[in-house]
Image (cartoon, rainbow, N blue to C red):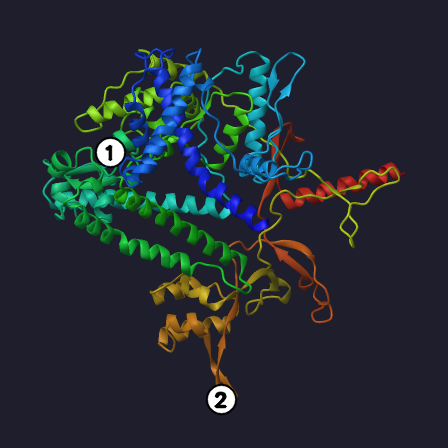
Amino acid sequence: MPKKLKKTVETITSTLKDKNNRITLANRCIEAIFKDEKHDFHSEEWDKSIVDDQIADLFGKRKFAEKPLTEQKEIRDEVIEKIEDTLKIAVTKNPNDYKYKPLRSDELILEYLNQQGFEIKKNAKLYHPSETEYNLERPKESDDGKTYLGSPRTPSVKNPVAMRALFQLRKLVNYLIKTGEIDRETRIHVELANEVNDKNWRKAIEDFQRDNEKKNAEYKAQIIKLCKECGFEIEPTESDIKKFRLWKEQNEMCPYTGKKISICDLFGPHPKFDFEHTIPRSLSYDDSLENLTLCYSDFNRNVKKQHIPSELTEEFAEISRRFERMYEDKINECLAIIERSKIRGGYIDPEIKNKKIVERHKAQLELDYYKGKLRRFTTKEVTGGFKHSQLNDTRIITKFALQYLRSVFPHTFPVKGSMTDTFKRQWGLLDRAESKDRSNYRHHVIDALTIACVDRRKFNLLSEAIRNSADGTHLKFAKPWDSFDKDVLAAVQYIVPKHFVDDNSLRQTKKVLRDPRTGKPKLDKNGNKIYIKGNTARGSLHKDTFYGCIMTPPEKGENLENKKPIFVQRVEVRTLVEENNKLMKDIDKVIEKNADKIVDKGIRNTFCNNLESGKQTLVDIHEKGILLPYKMKGKAVYVKRVRIIPRDPSAFKLKKQKDISEKNPNDYKQYYYVANDENYLIALYRGIDENGKEKSISQIISLYGAIKLSIDKRKKMKSFRAN
């Protein structure tokens, strides 16, 4: 029986996608029929070509044609039967009232178990990804007859940034429900494009964007210089910089024709090459660099037109090979960086570890970009799923916010950020070459007002306008109303942004006290769990690196009391000859960089002399260390680690070291020293001095200092209560 059960479960899970595709196809056809003004939904006569149109959109013509004829007929017959069953019972013209519910694997398995006579325990549930994914609290019915959002807390979301956003969403939405501004029938559009990432991902994205900004500045200077050499001057626009970037990426060649692209033909008075959308914009709604190439103008307008590359049957094989060669080396380079930056076994300094992770993430971002270009170039068909992916942003906050809002508002839909940007430009809220002004938060209001006016119908109309446009860019797309842009820009002038700051830094934790042997919760006399509170720091108290403290030796003729304590860090020698995790090439630059960095004068002089005299190369030092001028037992001696003065020379005592007093009785040697990482607040004091003048002083309190003050305060309060 277990083998039979296992086989049945495998059959259910493997065929579920196909069954749900048929239900999705039937639902799409029902929606199309009900929205057709020419069709009377009471009539069972309907246009059967709707099924073929929806099949092409869902499966793709080619992919569907590859299925066996018997399967094609079976799908059509099943869908037609579902549609006709619906039309027989239809009494309203709302298609949502008659759509079929998608199948779920857990329900099908439970149904099978019941048929086989298995006894199912009461309230027992099978695992299902959707419930584990969301598992949100049910909406709350209030005494005023209104339904409010429940708590968004769920075991599926561990990220505190996402939870904070969901709780703020609940506070705002429940207030709007209470005041009667919105109700269950309100249509909600969600645009939350910020992705929730960890510290290293955010750093990688920030560095990746900064590198692109630097490249753009360099490209701008190169464009001006190269155009001067061609005999004309130009002030590069954002579009010109994009062209130059693609020109470099494509090895100065058109992938479609193989023609070499000169700078004069690219930017001259009569340019011969222009932007080309790999997947036509009318199909993909994709204006990103991943979907753009430089193409010979005549080929783009007279051959490529509204086709995808794979539809150019005669030339596609050669075009595809040419395009892949352009990006082959770049992809291999990214893969090499990712492999080189992997963290392998053994201890590694946390700072170096984070650098490697950031480097790997940056390479992954670049790799995703190149792979995105190749995926668009080699796709065989543009299905509804591809279009849908351009409209929906499935990042983490959006995913949970959508499901959360849908628990009360059934008409909740996502809108992608790039879509909002295009509509803003079409409706006059942003010039075509203008970047979004992020100097204040009013741009969020403009985005919100735009999103509220975007729907599937407008998206289809815009796609049609792009398709009918001569060059796909200069469009005249109708605004929601004639004065829409003026009304929006006037309204935002009176918006005052409100910032929410939730201070959790010193909030105490509360944990269940558990038996150390069994791990079970301890109970009090009444059988209730015992909770304990601790001192909590929700943030980084200090940086990961531990510093040592030494006394600077006095200069000749100085008093011995003039010695000062300085903090030092022990590092591997190879880091002295590296910059951004890469081996440096300029010896003079290496010597200059480390002239005052190495604490020990003897080792510092040996390091510099070895390089200046040619006794050691940078590669040799990187691999072996600093060669000392003497030998031990006839063997060369290398220094692998040295003490240096860190960039941030300030540090504070963290705690006392154990068993060190006998080795070194000096007080400054008894402690671990660390550098501050986060500040908690800046205290500003203002008052009047003895001369009657206004005086102000400030004090910065670190998170570590705030925790210590909080602990001292609780101790004093405890002592006060005891007395």
Q: Would residue 161 be seen by someone viewing this image from the given angle?
A: no
Residue 103 in the image: state x and y as whole percent. Answer: 49, 32
Residue 586 in the image: state x and y as whole percent. Answer: 33, 65
Give the SS element for disc 2: loop
Of label 2 and label 1, which has the lower sequence position?
1
Relative vertical location of residue 184 with respect to residue 194 in this rendering, above or below = above
Give the SS element for disc 1: loop
Q: Would residue 506 be seen by someone viewing this image from the given angle?
A: yes
Q: Quadrant of residue 506?
A: top right
Q: Quadrant of residue 487?
A: top left
Given the current orientation, which residue lies at the most extreme bottom position? 634
Depth check, mark 2 against mark 1: the one in front is 1
Position of 17 with respect to 60 (left or right) is right
Position of 585 with respect to 706 (left or right) is left
Q: Counting other residues with Cα less than 10 Å from the Cα at mark 1, is it few (<14), some (14-19), or many (20 or more)?
A: many
Of the 4 image quadrants, the one containing the C terminus is: top right
Relative vertical location of residue 295 with respect to residue 517 in this rendering, above or below = above
Q: Tell me the tag on residue 634.
A: 2
For the residues labelled 2 and 1, the Cα–Cα distance comes to 73 Å
Q: Residue at x 32, y 47 (%)?
A: 371
Position of 474 with respect to 192 (left or right) is left
Residue 327 in the image: state x and y as whole percent. Answer: 26, 51
Q: Residue at x 81, y 38 (%)?
A: 717
Q: Which residue is mark 1?
A: 280
Kind of residue indicated by mark 2: Gly
Residue 337 in the image: state x and y as whole percent. Answer: 38, 57
Asked whether 352 or 526 is in front, the reply is 526
Asked whether 626 or 412 is in front, the reply is 412
Q: Quadrant of residue 442?
A: top left
Kind of residue indicated by mark 1: Pro
Q: Tell me the tag on residue 705.
A: none
